[in-house]
Amino acid sequence: MTEGETKITPDNLQAWLTEKFLEWAEIEAEEFDSNQPFTKYGLDSFGAMTFSTELEDELGFEINARLLWDNPNMDTLAAALAEELKKHQAE
Amino acid sequence: MYFNSFEYIFFLWAVYVLYWTLKEKRKLRFSLVLVGSYWFYAQADWRFTFLLFTSTVVDFFAGREIDKANEAGSNARRRAFLILSLVSNLGMLGFFKYYDFFVDSIEAVFESWNLWHLSAAKGGPLDYIVPAGISFYTFQTLSYTIDIYYRRIKPCKSHLEFAVYVAFFPQLVAGPIVRARDFLPQMQKTRKLTRDRISSGLFQILRGMTKKLVIADVLGAHLVDHVYRDAGSLEQSGGLAVLVATYAFTMQLYGDFAGYSDIAIGSARLLGFDLKKNFDAPFKSRSLEEFWTRWHISMSFWFYYYVFAAMGGNKRGIARTCFNLFITHLLSGVWHGAGWNFVLWGVWFGVWMVIVRLVRLLLPNGVMPRKAVFSFLGWLFTYHVCVFSLLFFRANDTESLVAALRALTDWSGPLPDVITTLPWQVWTVLGVSYFTAVWPESWNVRIENGWKRLPGLAQGAVLAAALLFFLGVAPPGLAPFIYFQF
């Protein structure tokens, strides 16, 4: 995250994550439903590998690509990632 | 110098002691690691160090120039320096790893057309050994320049730190392939030698040694090598023995390479560096895609990130996705080695990945229903696609490959000696290794936590006992790591 950007917290994580995913999947916000599986928008396990790396760079901690695979839509992923973020921030 | 040798243990111990003695004298510490890494690499052949040095110098320079061009907005210039990096790394890799294979293949074609005299006039193969680790460090430095090109990272300012990143001995020869943005920031951190770090590093090394010496070497020496010795032994062995040996080879390869990766990660951890997991219980995979997120993760990431995604990934329609998948796996096969068996291995995975992708089109949202029966079938299929892919890996030549395939279809003969006389200890190793490979992850965590809770003296006693055990069970002589050849 560069200086001047909003700090990512468990509370604003879903909004930030959605923005990142829309960018990654090259789709518009109105085409996206956070309840629908990521696969509907083209995310496969390889996509999960590259997307999770991009998230790692911004969040600053290691994210297993399978977290995206095991939490197959935005709502569940955001919740799982918020837990990871809390753990990391507590360390 | 192999990781599974006393020489390496002494070397690591010496570097470790000196490294932490130097406290926060960063330059001296990194110089020590650099000298140690070049010395380690020179043990294979001192001449190879020139290639390592060349790769380091070219990519340090190219990275800096690409960044300058990025800042100046000069597309032509940034592209020119990326091409310089690509040509020098891939040129070096192509020449040292593939030249002989290419010449041999051309000669075979000329020979089959009775034009051998023409081919001979072009000069034969050079017959040199492939420089150790060249596939790994060239990919590592390529990731550095490509990431700068795409403005994902800034170039490293220190020659010394960059040289350590390229030559870092724990992962120099067989990975994991580490990206600069995961490694270089760690060099800026203040390092502290904590009990947890020592304990965890030693645990990784112990786990790696167990995988290599108890699983890989025992299965290799007592079973796999007997059956796969040559085409004749494969034919004599019959279907069951070849099948059992192929299952055993799957575990041997896993033990060998995951063992190497564990030792690399543990050694790096002792020096204050954290490398990412390279294997993550691959035999639990319920789909081929999942398998590639669990097996040789750093390599599959490299191919998916720098090849598959760069070709458009899955964003340009199904036909293009299938093409990209096939090419990515074909290149991954070629990366593994200069031989038609590796090309076939790549084709095998490429074709299966395309088939799986097409089958996914029939499933709702492309996902297999989350039911136990589908998970089991998915696991069974994935596991066997992987097991049979290793026929291409293990068969020494085309004759052996054909013999293995023929044997697998002939189950008529009596049980061969290699199976009936196989010691129970080897069966135990095979069974236990598969069991531990698929048991719940929480058990691994529990074992590691248990180890960390042991007092230092008890840990020392366990290490000494393990060493004696390794000396007792490991076959005589040092078996090199299989992935060193790549």
Image (spheres, helix red, strand yellow):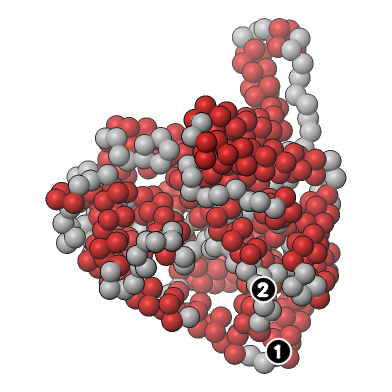
* Image quadrant in which you'd find residue B335: top right
Decide if residue B61 is in sight here.
yes
B441 sits to left or right of B473: left
| Total residue callouts | 2
Q: In this view, does B375 lie above or below B127?
A: below
Q: In this view, does B235 lie above or below B382?
A: above
Q: What residue type is labelled 1?
A: Gly
Numbered label attached to residue B409: none
- Image coordinates of residue B361 in percent, x first then y, are 22, 43
- Image coordinates of residue B56 in percent, x first then y, are 71, 44
Q: Look at the numbered disc 2 and give the secondary structure of its residue.
A: loop
Distance, label 2 to label 1, CA atoms, is 21 Å
Numbered label attached to residue B456: 1
Q: In which quarter of the image is the C terminus of chain B?
A: top right
Q: Is residue B213 above or below residue B343?
A: below
Q: Look at the numbered disc 1 and give the secondary structure of its residue.
A: helix
Q: What residue type is labelled 2?
A: Arg
- Image coordinates of residue B89 in percent, x first then y, are 65, 36
B3 sits to left or right of B89: right
Task: Name the residue: 67% across, 66% down.
Answer: B268
> Tags 2 and 1 in contact by the CB under 8 Å rule?
no
Numbered label attached to residue B191: 2
